[in-house]
Image: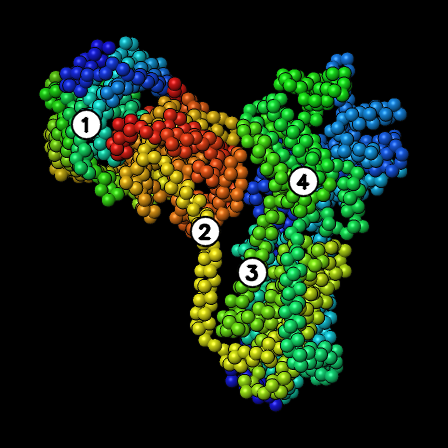
Amino acid sequence: MKRFTQVIALVNLIGIGPFASAMDLEHASLVSFESAYTHESGTWQKQELIWRPEWTARFNSGARLTLLGEARMDAEDNLDPGQPRQPFRAGLTRKNFPDDRIDLELRELYLDHYLADTYLRVGKQQIVWGQADGLRVLDVINPLSYREFILPDIEHRRIPLWSALAEIPVEEWTAQIVWIPDATVTESPLPGASYSVIPDPFGKGRLTVDRPESLEQSDVGFRLSSFQKGWDLTLNYLYHTIDDPLIRFDSAERRVLASYNRSHLIGATASKPFGSMTLRSEIGVETEKRFFDTASGNVIESEVASYVLGLDFSGFADWFISGQLFQTHRFNHLSGTERSSEMVTLLLRRDAFNNALQLEALSIYDVDVKDSLIQLEAEYTAATNVVIRAGSDLFFGERSGTFGQFRDESRITAGFTLSF
Amino acid sequence: MAQEISTHGERHTRAYGFFLRVIQLRWLTLITALFMVVGLGSQLGTLKKNTQADAFIDENEPALVYRKAVERIFNLKDPLVLAVANSGEKGIYNRESLELVRWLTNALASVENIDPQGITSLATESNIEGDTFGMEVREFLDGPLSDAHIAWIKNGIRHFPLYEGSLVAADGSMTLVIAELLDQEQAEATYQAVTTLIEQAPTGSNDVHVAGEGAVVGFLSEYIDRDAKRLNPLAALIITAVLVVAFFSLRAALIPNLIVLGTVAVTLGAMASSGTEFFVITNGLIVCMIGIAVADSIHIFSEYYETQAADPSLQRADAIAISMARIWRPVTLTTLTTAAGFLALYPTNDMPPMQFFGVFGAFAVFVAGILSLFVTPSLLSFVKLKPSRAFKHQSNQRQSRGILKVLSHVALEHPRKVLGGGMLVAAISLVGATKVIVNEERIENFQPYEAIYVADKAINRAMDGTYFLDVVIETPEAEGIYDPGVLSKINELQTFLEQQTEVHGTTSIVDYIKQMHKAVNEDDARFYSLPDDKNLIAQLFLLYTASGDPTDFEERVDSQRQTALVRASLKEGSYLLSQSLVPKLERYLQSQFNGEVTAQISGRINVDYHWIGGIAETHLNSVIVSFVAVFLMAALLFRSIVGALMAGIPVGLSILVIYGVMGLKGIWLGVGTSMFAAIAIGLSVDFAIHTIERLKQLSPQSTDASMKQQIAGLFMSTGRALWFNLLAVALGFGVLMTSKVPPLINFGALVALAVSIAFLASLLVLPAIVYIFKPRFIFNPNGSFWKTSLILVAILLVGTLAKTAVASEEAPEVGQIIEQMNTRPEGTSVQRDMKITLTDSRGSVREEQTRAFRRYFGETKKTVIFYTKPGTVAGTAFLTWDYAESQRDDDQWLYLPALRKVRRISASDRGDYFLGTDFTYEEIKKESKIAAEDYRFSLLGEAQVDGHHTWKVEATPVSAEVSNALGYGKVVLWIDSTVWIPRKNEYWDVNGNFLKTVYARNIENIDGIWAVSELEAVNQKTGHSTRIQFENTDYGAEVPARLFEQHALKRGY
């Protein structure tokens, strides 16, 4: 509650209020039960009960305040064992762990308001750029949580940040300005968790995260978007901290060090349908990305360009087929390593029984390492407020690969969601 | 001498060389033909026969679809009806009759294809009467049949109006045993099994009759088919005999038969391979094939023998090639014109069997033409040249010469009288044709002495009737039928029906309730009425189940007690009767059942009313188009409009005469008879073409006298061939007049008449015209193909323009209706909530709520829909920009909360279903309007929907491409003539299958704008339905422009 009042104070401070006294309050909640069973080890990976409430207050002035919360109880506690100290998160963005098995999080809390034609959203929120699904070129404003690797919906994987966004229409264009003082970075589960990717050569807990300073090292971004001759176009610029850490080992101190650097990201997106086919494309260049060469122990800095080309096909009734190619290219690279790396994704979705049943198969294939992830899911809306789902997340490939490393964590999932 | 010259002249033609080559390559020709015949003929085994009466109805005919649905709900089937009649003083109220009823009831249960649960008789039905416990339900034939018991039965029936007239005749002379069939397709076999059973029955002094719609419908097609099968071979024999008489030669008798066999085998084989079924009228197609193949052969043989007789020194191949060079043209011409006529039947007919008749008729004509032109000369080249005795000694053919001489004399000496006579015949026929009555009554297709006919008449005399018209009453909720208000409406409906002269009795659940009400009130007749208490009514049913079988009501009310059936009994099942009754009933139902409780007509009578009505509408059109097709083809082939007009005279006259005779003799235009005109066109065009071809050989410089001489020569050559053509076809099909089946008798007589008229018109009227008018077309070489084509195009253009001009007086009507609908005010902007209820075929319900905004930006219409509930889809948003330019695709975006991204989606699939509903994207966007450029519209008439006057408009997509994009092959709209909103739409998919119905349930005036507040789409295929309720509609709301931008989807509203 304290945080809530802080935000209200902040909002008032920057002059968006004052709120009119009259308001409508709407509430909606989702309660989900999600379970996952890893057949390799024959154990339950998770048995979670999650409550996701959402309150929206509409004020007479036209302003709208939205709060999204998340309370989770996991009977297994394998994904976030114990009460982790959350070194990757800024103070105001941290979750609350009242117990090993319970975590509480203020997911989002933001105020929407129009000042003349300028739209503002201020508060803890997700700001999403780009056109690609699952693959990140421009969608890097919010860091991700790898609590369950990349398996959940991206909505639940992004860590909402305290930030401000303004959208100003300028003739046929819309200019978006974003300011993100919240210095939270990509959150990897700590060693011991099912999907931990942080090496732990010195034993549990020897991790130092050199996170940037909130406010002082804010991210700022600018985007222009327009609809021109049937094309949805955007031009993007972001000055930011790269949220993925550079991991180094400090043998002297016997610790693992995660550090971050700042970079300029310049990019663009374009999409347009052609008959039943929709083309999505996205390109971005980071001016400085760092890599650690384990062989030499050196850090290499390079400009990196990445792009995604996606084609969606909806020419068959009730089918949605989407394929994407992702390529990233390092301009400065080590001899003996590849300059570029590629990934392809294929999504097949079939709606049946008037969309009551949705079957989905998503495959991500890493062309270089030749490993892959296949996600299968069946979702059935049994009644207005009840959705049942079952599926599996299957990792294939060598243990050294992006996906192959979690071969033992391939799982079968089942669950349901109630809404009210 | 003239003959000599022309014989030698043929040798210089390309055709002569061509046929010499054909004869050289005869093996190749024969083997190819054999392959074709054997290849397709081998498929004959797979030809599926369909003698079902329903085969003639388009399976998507809404009345038929609805009837089948009603039959499922109430477990109804067309029954076999057995009647036990006793003319004694006590009627059937005697032990022997009642024992017979019991015996028949038991025995029928074990007859194959009879539903043991679906037998109704005195032995299965129960009396309802009062007793000390309130109500006793006791089977009529329960226990030994003592005099006292029989008296109890008689008394019970007399005081139970439901049974009097429907189960036992009012005078007690007859009682029925009604047996429902499990499979209607085996009705004929079951009918036979039951007649055998009756022979073994202890009938005593009783008469037992078998009739009923099940028997009639099932038996009729078989009855016709069987006789046709018996007589068609006989026709072939007679035709062979005619050939023998004509040519005195074995080859001339055998080869045409081989051609006929080949044509039949290839055509039926092609039908089999294409999966087309053999319908009852396909027998008529065989008739045509025989007629056409024989005609071609007769002309070829006549030419062959004539050539030989003229120049006996000719070599074998030479003689054949010369004859073929001379005859190929008229044979080809007749083939093309006849095929055009047949083909025109396809697009202009509603009945699938007639459409196939057209397509395969044209195919058969081609096959016959090709076999005649190639196989006949090839076969002839194997046999020695042997003159026909008929041609060697022409005096032998005194008979034909005699008749032809008379004709020639009449035509040439009294040409004006001939023309006058022709016109008189046409005029009389025209008058007769106007008297043609569209009607169909199946029982009248049987001879009056047939047992089934006798039974039908006897039963319908004594009882209320064995033909049914049903009305289905639907209430909005379960047990809605128990509502006294609903029951009293049903009661009033029954009273209305019984007041109609066509109706002789009605039954419904009301009759049971009244009887039960009386029973619980100590059988006091004053209580034979409807209780005014829903609970009491429910209790009566409960009480009934204490001693009776609850399934006793299953044919009157569904198990949910939500839908009830009112059945009216009619003594006859003719289309004429339905034509007078159904509209009256429709009007009554529209005025009385226009609220939540709805009423719809069903039953076979209603089905007949709708689809036979369709025949009446399309038939004339079909014949005209077919005739025009023949005319156009003839014009192109003769390269002359006058030539086409001349060819049209015998064809037109024979069609007119057919209708004239039908009108004057009172032969109804119905299912079977609707093909007569088509056959007349097919068979009569030959006569005209051959005559004209021959007339064209007249010398242009002829004096009247020499012309007479030349025309007389025509009578002796072509005339002779036509004479035998006539004899073969007329006698061949005249045989059908000996059939015992009335439709076949008519068929035989009319086919014979049609060819006779065509023969006479060709040989009398055409020469007379030539003689009097000396048309240039006859004496000049053929005109220019392009010139004729241009003239035809001009005629067609003028015709089309004229039609459009005539139609333009009506066109604005349908055009205006669509325009009125599409320009209906809908406000510049609107904001409203939509509650979407999705119900699947099992009754599972999902509800979704959305908030929708729509606003016009100039002519661009932008719509945005935000999902608000349930939580699992909340946040999903959908934006469309719909441009005024029809060729410009919409732009669409979708926001999925799970991605938090606005996603561009392709707009090309307008026919895709909108987010799981039964409405397409197009329909959601159009808001009860329609994209006029996508469809061709025609006004079908007026109709009442929910008590409102509507224009019934049919919309057909302009192209296959549009049809595929929209997902529809046809849409029928019922557009309210006051508020210009469709109150009901029916949709057919691209394959022509009935797909769904959309109802506009509530139409309200909001802020001065008419708006639908509840829409429902029911998908017939999936059983899924979608209801959209519009709430909080506000046309005055301020809807900001920014809501319709892509960014707005993620911002929310």
Foreground tag (3 vs 4):
3
Mark 4 is surrounded, within 10 Å at the Cα level, by few (under 14), some (14 to 19) or many (20 or more) other residues, namely some
Left or right, B610 with respect to A136, comes to: right
Foreground tag (4 vs 1):
1
Q: Look at the numbered discs 1 and 3 and tell me whether their residues touch, using CB distance below 8 Å.
A: no
Label annotation for residue B811: 2
Mark pair 2, 1: CA separation: 51 Å
Q: Which residue is mark 3?
A: B624
Is B1005 or B347 nearer to us in this picture? B1005
Label annotation for residue A116: 1
Looking at the rendered structure, whether the residues under marks 2 and 1 are on a common chain is answered as no
Left or right, A115 with respect to B203, comes to: left
Foreground tag (4 vs 2):
2
Quadrant for the N terminus of chain B, please.
bottom right
| Residue A379 percent location from the top left of the image | 41, 28
Question: Closer to the N terminus: mark 4 or mark 2?
Answer: 4
Looking at the rendered structure, whether the residues under marks 1 and 3 are on a common chain is answered as no
Left or right, B728 with respect to B982, comes to: right
